[in-house]
Image (spheres, rainbow, N blue to C red):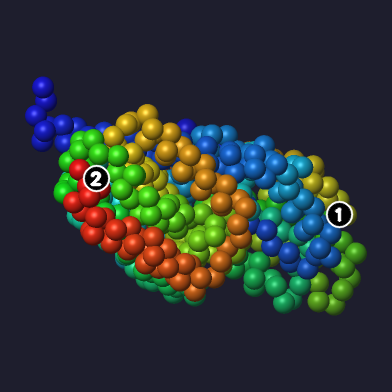
């Protein structure tokens, strides 16, 4: 029985986006798109999250932050990089402080293209991520729960 | 005819088994109605069950090992409080177990090192301080009317308690707003505002620990609405209608009133407990021979 696909909670982080993609991410939460229909909740807490939505490219200042958030999300988890900046650095790629896409710092599962990415394609990206989340859960189950159950082992 | 101890035991077991189902359904309907009030479609009615099922599938990240103990105690004492209540036990003992379970939640939040968690714990404590007098007044008021602290005696008294305790009932509705974590008093953790500081008390819980907190909250729903039933215990139909109206009112208030600061929460809770509660009890005391049965 899987509940993971029916209740994906997301955490949203703006790496160094122009806010265009962020506005579109938040648009998906408005009554027009209402992603809570699918049980999706935008949490502000990585410890409650399943899906990590990142917008914008990674720079020297926030590479540690992105890593830190990623590490605090309990397994199984997926990362969705939203917008062209999150994929490759976009027009900021050449900047002296920009490292490039999100995949330079953490493993990314889904790239959502666009500048800015449309709410429809963001929702589509999250739905694709749900499939990956499910395979990750099964892989985790096969590996056994020996790392899961020990208190303190996940810190 | 079933003897009374057996009946109590059956009631307690039924509560332990069925309350999570009822509580989860209430939470699901709550979310649906809330979404409709906000002009959204809203999640499926069974969404709270999916959420908790998911939390048990996730990795349980532990910040400090004592968290397990505190969260489990929160759940266990909440179940004990509800089971005592539904088996017709002593109201004061029920309130004691109920308060104790929340103290464990506060200790659980304090046991981590996150400042958000600590703020949540402090706010939860403030909420306990705010609603505790009114809960005690509720029990005392029911004692003054029915001459018993036993839930079974209160329910079987056949007295329309609401007519004697209208002030206490309004005060209890206020407590309900705090306890159901509804705006304007959703300070320590909220069903909305997931990105804000008000997620406080649950900040450092994840996976199955967070799931246990949710389940304890479902038990709490059923217990709190059970107390509403007591006010109308003379007629089950009216009582169930009162529960539905009271809960709908809570959702409406939740969606129309913005969150207040903790100072106002404390002040208004005590003001209502101090005026409506004490005046109600005082009138009952002085008019004992006149209006009491």
- Residue occupied by mark 2: B85
Q: Nearer the viewer, mark 1 or mark 2?
A: 2
State the CA–CA distance, disc 1 to disc 2.
56 Å
Do the residues marked 1 and 2 share a common chain? no
* Label 2 element class: helix
Q: Which residue of the protein is positioned furthest toward the front in this rendering?
A: B290
Q: Which mark is residue B119?
A: none
Residue A90 seen in render = yes
Label 1 close to label 2 by CB (< 8 Å): no
Q: Position of residue A30 (x, y in %)?
A: 73, 48
Q: Nearer the viewer, residue B174 or A42?
A: B174
User: How dense is the environment of label 1, judged by Cα within 10 Å: few (below 14), some, or many (20 and up)?
Assistant: many
Q: Nearer the viewer, residue A12 or A96?
A: A12
Q: Is B149 rendered above or below residue B27? A: below
Q: Quadrant of the C terminus of chain A?
A: bottom left
Chain at numbered mark 2: B
Residue name at image x 77 percent, y 42 percent = A32
Q: Which mark is residue A116?
A: 1
Residue name at image x 54 percent, y 64 percent = B198
Q: Position of residue A79 (x, y in %)?
A: 66, 53
Residue name at image x 20 percent, y 53 percent = B288
Q: Position of residue A150 (x, y in %)?
A: 35, 57
Q: Nearer the viewer, residue B179 or B189?
A: B179
Q: Nearer the viewer, residue B190 or B283?
A: B283
State left or right for residue B280 relative to residue A6: left
């Amino acid at each position: 029985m899987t509940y993971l696909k029916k209740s994906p909670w997301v955490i949203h982080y703006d790496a160094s986006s122009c806010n265009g993609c962020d506005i579109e991410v938040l648009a998906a939460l408005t009554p027009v798109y209402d992603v809570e229909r699918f049980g999706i909740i935008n949490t502000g807490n990585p410890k409650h999250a399943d899906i990590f939505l990142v917008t914008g490219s990674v720079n020297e200042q926030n590479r540690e932050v992105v890593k830190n958030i990623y590490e605090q999300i309990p397994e199984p988890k997926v990362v969705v990089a939203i917008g062209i900046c999150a994929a490759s650095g976009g027009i900021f790629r050449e900047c002296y402080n920009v490292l490039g896409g999100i995949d330079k710092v953490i493993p990314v599962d889904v790239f959502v293209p666009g500048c800015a990415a449309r709410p429809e394609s963001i929702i589509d990206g999250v739905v694709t991520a749900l499939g990956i989340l499910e395979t990750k859960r099964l892989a985790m189950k096969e590996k056994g729960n020996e790392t899961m159950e020990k208190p303190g082992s996940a810190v | 005819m079933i003897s009374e101890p057996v009946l109590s035991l059956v009631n307690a077991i039924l509560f332990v088994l069925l309350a999570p189902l009822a509580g989860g359904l209430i939470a699901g309907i709550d979310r649906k109605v809330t979404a409709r009030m906000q002009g959204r479609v809203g999640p499926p009615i069974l969404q709270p069950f999916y959420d908790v099922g998911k939390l048990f599938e996730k990795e349980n990240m532990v910040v400090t090992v004592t968290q397990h103990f505190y969260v489990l105690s929160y759940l266990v004492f909440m179940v004990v409080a509800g089971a005592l209540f539904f088996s017709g036990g002593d109201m004061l003992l029920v309130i004691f177990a109920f308060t104790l379970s929340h103290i464990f939640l506060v200790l659980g939040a304090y046991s981590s090192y996150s400042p958000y968690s600590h703020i949540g714990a402090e706010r939860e404590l403030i909420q306990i301080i705010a609603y505790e007098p009114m809960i005690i007044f509720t029990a005392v008021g029911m004692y003054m009317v029915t001459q018993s602290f036993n839930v079974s005696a209160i329910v079987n008294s056949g007295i329309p308690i609401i007519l004697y305790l209208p002030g206490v009932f309004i005060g209890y509705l206020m407590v309900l707003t705090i306890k159901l974590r509804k705006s304007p008093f959703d300070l320590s953790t909220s069903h909305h505002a997931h990105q804000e500081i008000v997620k406080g008390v649950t900040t450092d819980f994840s996976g199955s620990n967070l799931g246990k907190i949710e389940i304890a909250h479902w038990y709490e729903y059923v217990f709190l609405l059970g107390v509403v039933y007591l006010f109308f215990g003379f007629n089950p139909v009216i009582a169930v209608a009162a529960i539905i109206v009271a809960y709908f009112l809570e959702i409406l208030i939740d969606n129309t009133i913005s969150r207040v600061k903790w100072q106002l929460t404390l002040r208004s809770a005590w003001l209502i407990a101090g005026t409506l509660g004490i005046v109600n009890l005082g009138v009952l005391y002085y008019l004992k021979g006149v209006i009491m049965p």
